[in-house]
Amino acid sequence: MTFISILYGLLFWAATLILVIGVGRRVHLYWKVPAPLKIVTTPAPVTRSGVVWRMFKEVVFFTSLFRASKYTWVFAILFHMALWLVLLRHTRYFMDMNSFLVFMQPFGRYAGFAMLLGLTGLLGRRMLVDRVRYISAPSDFLMLLLLLSIGVSGMMMSFGVHTDIVQVKAFFHGLMTFDWQPLPGDPLLLLHLLLVAVLMIIFPISKLLHAPGVFFSPTRNQVDNPREKRHVAPWARELEREHKLYADDTPTAPVSR
Ligand code: HEM
Ligand code: HEM
């Protein structure tokens, strides 16, 4: 067992804990934060199932972004869809192969090009469009550069200097079953994994929280029914009951006392 293997083993255990606990705490916070007002962006669905459909379109097709900017949409959708394909192919390092994964391998491999193209477009937009450059913080650039570096180092392994992926799988399987195995010492692999660990560690404190966050956005997840159903935040409802301001099921008018 090499020193590097132990170091990377500990690094990935720590990174996984930080990612899972960090994102879990954030989601808990998003869950708890009150949404006291109806602030749904109209035109909006008037039923729960309509909201689910709207959210689906938002997450899969980036509908709002499409309306806002076609160029950004093209690069963003290219990057995100390719990322999912790449990550799907990557599950082979953590689980046994099945026929679906075998089928997906070439798609995941070539999606790497689309991912890099999308990221380059998004970076170009931040640098070349004055309006966007003005509101960009260093972290906006760093996030894109981090993802680009992960993608480039991965592609260099996939299409250039190969690593021993059977041993990579044994290493990660060993981490999950507490049966440590050595990690290949190729510099490109070590760089790729170091950058991935950085990504996992900063995820819970970065803009990447938009991934879970989109589901909690009140402008997108509320039903547009303020006239049919009086909207009262849970804490306000408590107050109302306490002071008997409104009858429990009265739609709008205060009860005369
Ligand atoms: C539910 C999953 C996700 C959804 C729905 C989503 C959606 C979006 C959308 C709509 C944008 C464009 C925002 C804008 O510029 O107005 C965006 C930007 C971005 N997303 Fe995601 N995303 C998801 C997951 C992820 C993940 C897992 C990553 C990375 C690991 C990621 C990385 C990024 C980055 C870096 C940007 C900023 C691009 C820029 O600088 O302009 N996203 N995402
Ligand atoms: C612990 C997590 C990860 C491990 C063990 C890992 C390992 C690897 C390995 C061994 C390769 C080379 C594949 C080959 O030679 O056939 C690779 C390629 C690649 N990796 Fe990763 N990687 C991880 C996470 C990520 C993440 C989070 C991203 C994206 C943000 C990423 C993006 C890529 C890309 C784009 C390629 C090239 C295309 C491909 O072969 O799929 N990797 N990765």
Image (cartoon, rainbow, N blue to C red):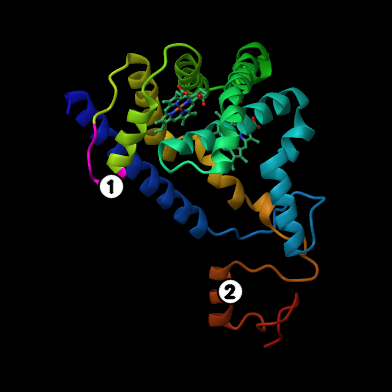
Name the residue that disc number 1 marks: 177
Q: Looking at this rendering, what residue extends furthest in the bottom direction? A: 257
Q: Is residue 72 magenta?
A: no
User: Looking at the image, in which quadrant does ligand 1 appear?
Assistant: top right
Q: Residue furthest right?
A: 43
Asked whether residue 180 is drawn in magenta, I would say yes
Q: Quadrant of the C terminus?
A: bottom right
- Which mark, by number, is residue 11? none
Image marks 1 and 2: residues in contact by CB distance under 8 Å: no
Question: Picture coordinates of residue 205 (x, y %)?
Answer: 42, 37
Q: Residues within 10 Å of mark 2 (few under 14, many from 20)?
A: some
Q: Residues within 10 Å of mark 1 (few under 14, many from 20)?
A: few
Dot 1 falls on a residue whose secondary structure is helix
Look at 46% across and 20% down and name the residue there.
154
Secondary structure type for disc 2: helix
Pointer 2: what residue? Answer: 237
Q: Is residue 44 left or right of residue 153?
A: right
- Residue occupying the point 43% across, 43% down: 95
Q: Nearer the viewer, residue 78 or 95?
A: 95
Q: Is residue 129 left or right of residue 30?
A: right
Q: Nearer the viewer, residue 254 or 223?
A: 223
* Residue 58, horizontal then vertical, whole percent: 70, 44
Q: Which residues are magenta?
A: 176-181
**Amino acid found under the numbered disc labelled 2:** Arg
Tell me which amino acid carries mark 1.
Thr
Does residue 64 sit above or below 217 in this rendering? above
Is 242 situated above or below 55? below
Residue at the spot x=47%, y=11% of the render? 160
